Image (cartoon, rainbow, N blue to C red):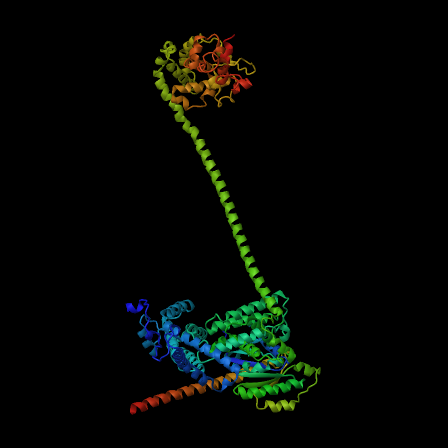
Amino acid sequence: MITSKMPSLRIDQNDLKCKNGCDYFGNPQWQGYCSKCHREQMQRQRKAEKASSFTSTLPRSDQRKSERGLKLSSHASFSKFEEKRLRQSETLKKTNLLKFNVFKKNITDDHEISTERRQPEFKIPTAVFEGMKADFRVRFPSFPPQIDRDARGFVHTFILDVIKWAAIMNVDELSERVQKQYQRFMKHMETSQHYASVDSDARELLIDFVEKHAMTYLHELPSIVFSPSGTDDERQDRAMSERIQQLSWVGEKHLECKLDRNNAECRRLLYKAISELLGMDAARWSGAKLARVRRCARHVLRLAAPAPASADDLLPALILAVLKANPPRLISNINYVTRFCNAQRLMTGEGGYYFTNLCCAVSFIQNMTAESLSMDKKEFDCYMAMPASIGGSAWAAALSLCGATREAEEQSALAAKLLEQTKEIQREAENMANNAATFEEQIAKKVQDVLAKTPLEIKPRRELPRLRREGVGSAPPPTTEPGPARTSEPPALLNEPSVVIDETEKLNILGFEVVEERSPSKSPQLDRLSDLKQSSSTELLTPSPMVLTPFDCRSLDEVLTPDEFPDNIPGLSDVNYDIDLSDFSADTSLAEDPPAPDRRRTFDPFAPQTSKDSYKLLESFDEFSIVDNARESDPYEVVHRPDPFGSVLDNDEGRASILDDSGSPTAACLLPSPIQPQNSAKPT
Amino acid sequence: MSRCDFKIVLLGSEHVGKTSLVLRFVNCRFNAEIPYQNTVGAAFCAKAMRSKEKDYSIGIWDTAGSERYEAMTRIYYRGAHAAIICYEPSSHESWTRLRHWLHELRTVEDSCKVYLCGTKKDLLDGGFVKREVAEEIVNTYSQDLNGHFLTSSKTGENVDELFQKIVDDLAADVEVMKTVTESRLLLTELDKRKSKKDVCAC
């Protein structure tokens, strides 16, 4: 093997000879044969192929011949036959499919299936009976369960019977058998005693019920009842559909029906009728199909309004509707209804009449000639020769317009609905806003209520000072006694004004007893401090904002705080300012009462002075005031001289850079300084 | 319900007054009681009728009289219990058409009862039109038929009588048919039993 594959330089002469062994040389292109042998070989192969293909096609062609019989001669019939064959293969496929569906056993084993095919035992899906049971309960709630069982049992045998016989019987026999089944059930209802209480109307409903469920299931099975095998329903369907396409040029004037395609109402009714016709195919049992036809016919009859429509109006309009609708599987549907509906029940009434009219319309369309349209034969032929695509009539346009308007209507309805919804949402949003507002009001009210209650809660606050007064009551000795020591201990002095404020508050509330008690304690303070600034008290009590006084340089750091600046009302503002300073004492009782200063301002004329004192003392800790204290006589020069940055910068520049007043707002507008009176007092 | 006991077909050429006849019959007599399908039209009418203390509902099928639909008429009278063939005494043409239907009915539906109905009697009585169909001919034709009426849809003359006669006849017929079928059933059952017995005996 390996050697033969190896490329060898030496080629034996035998290798070059024809494989057949004739003395001619072979050629690898001819598979090692010589030209003659290769040709022979090829011919043999071709023949073999032909033979095999022939054997495979042979039975089919035989079948064709036998089926076609004498009709074979014409070409037209051949094409029809082709169609039929196609259809048969289709139905064959369907039946295979059907068997897979109907034999509800596991399809895992091929062998099993093949055995099943031979013995057709049908098993109806339990879902059918479940659905039936539910439907029965809804429709006939008062009926005894015996009837329910009866009906289901009947449907079961009915379906099995039909499937069993469908393979053997032709359609007409089967149809007869189905009719007999209906009669059998009716007879059963008449004879059986548990139907004695059921009146005739309910009996009719019951037979309808049975028919509906049996036929709905059978309709789903292909080629059993709907366009059954052995009939050419499907071919007729196609032929009919083509015929209708060919006749698309037929309009209302050809049929002499009084329809006005420019009338919107007329168009609408015809459109409705057509949609009902188209819906007929989707309905599964004949009763539903007939209902569709009935509705369609009613729409058509309304076309003749206001005059009561007669058959003379109905039939032409119905023909037109069928022509324009071109319903799918029309012939199959008609045949299905005629063969398998309960003839006694459905065909005698109104539905039967309209169905008959539909049959008439179909037969008219099938046999339509020039005479039946009362037009010239040449013209008719001309129309018929025209390709179907060209022959669109104005009706098609009108109906498509109708469809479009319908769609537009649907859309507009949808839009209206949406609009309504948005309005609803808006309304709800408003409601919600209202709710929120009322809620807010309620909350505000509640808050107000709570606020109204809070003055009551102030009482414990008032108690607080009283409690403290007891503490203070014991305290007076320390407050009064360390009076002289205050000069040496500034923090102790800072505590002092807070106590005073509390006491002044108490004065308002509790009366004058305390005032008498307090006033002596304060007086030494005032006396002592008056030594430092004699006229300060008088200055403060006379608020004179108009007096422009020289700017106080020492108070620069406080003045610069922007919070206090705009509130600076001369005289009175000083009081506020001082209280802030007194907060440094870390006395909590003071911090709790912000409105206290106002009260104190009005009631205690001494307060400002005390605070002023504290301020004065605080100032003594200021880095500037250290220098300042030394040269109290000249307050103006304090800023200029103790410049900490003087070593780095020039004297003049240093003045301007950090501590210069020109950059500060106070210097610009020359507003009165809060500590102004103090300074103004000094020069005087 | 949608079921009707009797199916009655109206036949006749165009403009003889089939629709008017139906409208007259359906809307006038039990006007207050059953306003049946006034809006829908006169193509199909159902009405409850009484005959010998028994109620029957009849369905009256109007047909298109136009000649172009004549070929389809056969579909209409399939399975009809009774047929009313209308003609206009003043029009000879309508009479010739009547003969055509008569012939067809005889051959296709031989069990169907046929009634002749000459319409527009009021015009005839008033002398507005001249009679073209001789009474003798009509009589000879109607001899082997179930009945002949001259009606006027305008005045309502003979209209109810016509339909009442039809219902009476059909009701009587149904009774007969029923007894026939029942007896036949009995016979077959007896036969079955007999055969069974025979089998057993063997």
The answer to whether B132 is drawn above or below residue B22 in the figure is below
In the rendered view, would you say A669 is above or below B101?
A: above
Is residue A654 among what the camera can see? yes
Residue for point 57% across, 64% down: A403
Q: How many marks?
A: 0
Q: Position of residue A162 (x, y in %)?
A: 40, 78
Residue A293 picture location, percent across and down: 52, 72
How far across and how far down the image is residue A82, in percent?
Answer: 48, 79
Quadrant in the rendering for residue A226: bottom left
Where's the N terminus of chain A, which quadrant?
Answer: bottom left
Going 36% across and 77% down the picture, which residue do you hit?
Answer: A18
Which one is in front, A264 or A237? A237
Q: Is residue A110 left or right of residue A138?
A: left
Image height of A236 relative to A650, above or below: below
Q: In the image, what residue occupies the spot 59% across and 84% down?
A: B85
Residue B42 visible in this rendered orientation of the protein: no
Q: Nearer the viewer, residue A79 or A176?
A: A79
At which x and y percent is residue A417? 53, 55
On the image, which quarter does residue A406 sit in? bottom right
